[in-house]
Amino acid sequence: MPEYVVGEQRGIELVNIEEGVYEATFKGIEERSITVDQEERKILEWRFSIETENSEVVVTGITSNKISVGRQPSKAYKWFCALVGRELKSGEKINTDELVGTKVLVEVKYKKLRDGSLVSRVVDVKKLPKKEVKATKTKSGKDVSTT
């Protein structure tokens, strides 16, 4: 498991990419504290990289630090399930270091900040669908697979 270090509060990095669904690579999670209505809350900031025509863009998404399963699973639980590719059981431990590099689908939407600026945010994470492999026969009768 990664170790967390107390650091300076930092602002939100302004990244803009068109809204949509993208294939992305999981880069890691950082636990942060934010203040909402004068109350400090712990959150998880998830980082994903998206390859564009010109460069790699890192986008983030925010969830609570609660990873709970049940009738209404938490967003963090759903995102972890997408990363591991299956449903997780209560009490199961997750090593985020082992998940770095995992490919997933991320949904990106614009979020308006208090100062009026827009930032691209990950709002959902889904398991990357498996590629279909089609078996076909050549004229000679041999099976060949294509994707």
Image: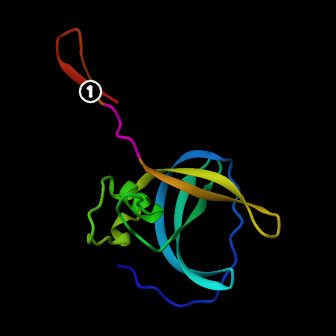
Q: Position of residue 144 (x, y in %)?
A: 23, 23
Q: Report the side of 81 relative to 23 (left or right).
A: left
In this picture, residue 44 sits left or right of residue 100: right
Residue shown at the point (44%, 72%) measured from the top left: 66
Quadrant of the snapshot with the N terminus: bottom left
Question: Circle 1 sits on which residue?
Answer: 145
Image-based side of 4 in relation to 32, left or right? left
> Picture coordinates of residue 19 (x, y %)?
66, 47
- Give the farthest residue toward the left: 141
The residue at the far front in this view is: 71
* Quadrant location of the C terminus in the rendered image: top left
Choose top left, top right, bottom left or bottom right for residue 93: bottom left
Residue extending farthest to the right is 116
Majority secondary structure in the magenta region: loop
Residue type at the position of mark 1: Ser
Secondary structure of the residue carrying tag 1 is strand
Q: Is residue 106 magenta?
A: no
Q: Residues within 10 Å of mark 1 (few under 14, many from 20)?
A: few
Q: Position of residue 29 (x, y in %)?
A: 48, 71
Residue found at x 17% / y 12%:
141
Picture coordinates of residue 117, whole percent (x, y): 80, 63
Placement of 136 over or under 145, stated as above or below = above
The quadrant holding residue 3 is bottom left
Q: Which residues are magenta?
A: 128-132
Residue 38, placed above or below residue 52: below
- Say which residue appears at 68% left-offset and 52% top-offset: 17
Residue drawn at 34 percent across, 40 percent down: 130
Which of the two residues, 74 or 83, is positioned nearer the viewer here? 74
Q: Tell me where residue 91 sits by quadrant.
A: bottom left
